[in-house]
Amino acid sequence: MSTFSARVKSVINDNDLQIALSKATTKLSSGREASIASLENADLIRDMARRAKLNILHNLDENLLKFEHRLIDNGVNVHWAEKGTDACEVVIKIAQKRGIKKVAKSKSMVSEEIHLNEALIKAGLQVIETDLGEYIVQLADDRPSHIIAPIMHMTRHRVGEIMHRHLNVPYTDDIKELARYAREKLRSEFLSAEIGITGANFGVVETGTICIVTNEGNARMVTTLPKIHIVIMSLEKLVPTLADLDLMLKILARSATGQKLTSYTTLIHGPKVDEENVGPEEVHVILLDNGRTGIFGSEQAEILGCIRCGACLNICPVYKNIGGHAYGDVYPGPIGSVLTPGLKGLLEWKDLPYASSLCGACKDVCPVRLDIPQMLLSLRKNAIKEKIPFGLKIGMKGFGIITAYPGLYKFIRNIGSLFLRLIGRDGWIKRFPANWLIPTDLLNGWTKVRDFKVPARKSFQDMWIEREKSYE
Amino acid sequence: MNSPGFTDSKSKIISCIKKFRSAGSVILPNAKPDLAEKIEYPSLNEEELLSGFIEELKALEVDSYVEYSPENVRERLRSLIHGKSILSWEPQSLPYDLGTILEKENVIYGRDEITVQTKAEIGLTGCDAAIAETGSLVLVQKKGQPKTASLLPFVHVAVVKKSEIYFSMGEFFVKDGKEAAGSPCVNIITGPSRTADIEQTLTIGVHGPGKVIVVIGP
């Protein structure tokens, strides 16, 4: 897999992407700000929502068992999956046992995480994504780049081209027309699919409610028309009561898009009960771990309180410049920088905790006040602990010795300052000299990406001493 | 249907969480201890709730009509649905004797073939509760109340009784949550189907109704 910096390089000069990103993140952020500002008791509601999430996590095992119990009472089939592949296998078995060939999905981050589509296709099933953005992603064989806005990275011209090429419809960049194409094409898919797959935004322990929110109505379609509904739900999605669900719903859409509520909030309790009604005959819930228990036992356990609104992406100065794909995995932005190393291993993903200026904007906007900067810091600490680069080890040791002796520190500082002033031009160092003594890459790693200001003639320490003297 | 592998997953997951908890190694902050137990909602009378509800509907671009007698509700409905193919709740589930105006119309019900239902132009439903704070309609799936009526047609007409308007969803959950939790599916509908997936530009009517009309009766 490519490195983080290689991925960043490939997106940072993509003009279309930069325009799309800046437009979308600004719009979503200002929507969020206005919407939260107009919510009465917003601070209290956020505190209460945070408490509800933390209460669930503190007793996660008991809550999971209670929730399972409720689901079974409601007539729901419950499956547990330790790994993503286990969850895929459950879905495949349900389909194969009934000779089912076609599956319709509504948007679900967790299904992306476990690569469900690839597994189902490999097992001979046809899978249709039905969220407009995810549908385009599937047609173009691309990847979603934002938790709630999967094709944030595409312009409408690109969407028009994709639809034209794959759906055999006339090219247009009229957004209304593009949405109409999707409505028509997907309506017949909804009617012919025999399994509907969704994620879950929340699971209510008290009542065994599965709560799914969408704006388009595709989750309603896939939980209404196919005869089987399968929910893939990761362990941490629980909330204690319906009153707590109300808190979550108050802040989720506001933080995500600035809406008070999404168009559709669907509460599922089980299969249809009377013959006259339309609805699934079977409902299955797959409770998925896939690395979450590992996070539960780590210093980043708090991240399991995330409700996936995406507000931290839209406000993050790093995300705003590099977009979702540069993060390299399913969950981008500040939340992804904590989640991905937690789910997939810090060693391989140790770059992500550094993809942050630690400005704290993510913590400010997080509806459940997750301390993301603190978690990023603790991940950085662990990344270093796992393997300290040799150069850094020597450098830090040397720095320790130098700073322990003021005379030595002053001497080295003066030499350094003189050297920098000598190689500077017009007050700036644009590149370091390289010759037989200094290898090119040793110092130019810095000047490759930014210029360096020449140090002042007089050091701060010298100025301080002079100032003290002038008072005497 | 559970193969041994999956019950195994359950015990692995639960015992792993238990292990971390009993070792005292779970590092989770505590929430602020001195928080209020619940949020206090303003107590509004029926008229105030109604005007708040209508204001929210307007913001969602939902058309609303307030009628002051059952006859007027029926008259309004007739003018909205006459001559169209209508996918409707069963007459006995609709308020204000609306069944009487359906007799002369082309009506499809939830018990009809799904391929027939999907051809309807207008969906007609009652409503189990309305939420003033967000302009939402709460539709509980039960006998005579198919959820397809508020989903498949491009236009959804919902009839709301003024007395069914709550201030917030939280209030509805407190009063009727237990009953709602007994239904296989509850839909809370807030405006028309929409997407902003392409260039974050709002577009109406992707999969669900592109137009929602609310008729509020006495």
Image: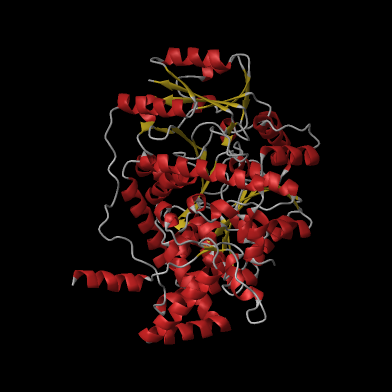
Residue A74: x and y, percent?
51, 52
Give percent across and percent down for residue A445.
Answer: 61, 70
Q: Which colour scheme is used?
A: secondary structure
Q: In this view, does B8 lie above or below A23?
A: below
Q: Which of A321 and A439 is in front in this view?
A: A439
Please give the name of the residue rendered at 70% of the width and 33% of the height, measured from the top-left corner. Answer: A173
**Residue B129, x across and y down, in percent:** 42, 33
Residue B85 position, x and y percent, is 64, 20
The quadrant where residue A118 appears: bottom right
In the picture, the quarter occupied by the C terminus of chain A is bottom left
| Relative vertical location of residue A13 with respect to residue A403 in this rendering, above or below | above
Residue A344 seen in the figure: no
* Nearest the eye: A173 or A249: A173
Residue B186 located left or right of residue B85 = left
Task: Specify whether B84 is left or right of A32.
Answer: right
Can residue A87 be seen here?
yes
Q: Which residue is drawn at 28% across and 71% down?
A: A466
Along the horizontal axis of the image, is A129 left or right of A374? right
Q: How many numbered dots are placed on residues in this image?
A: 0
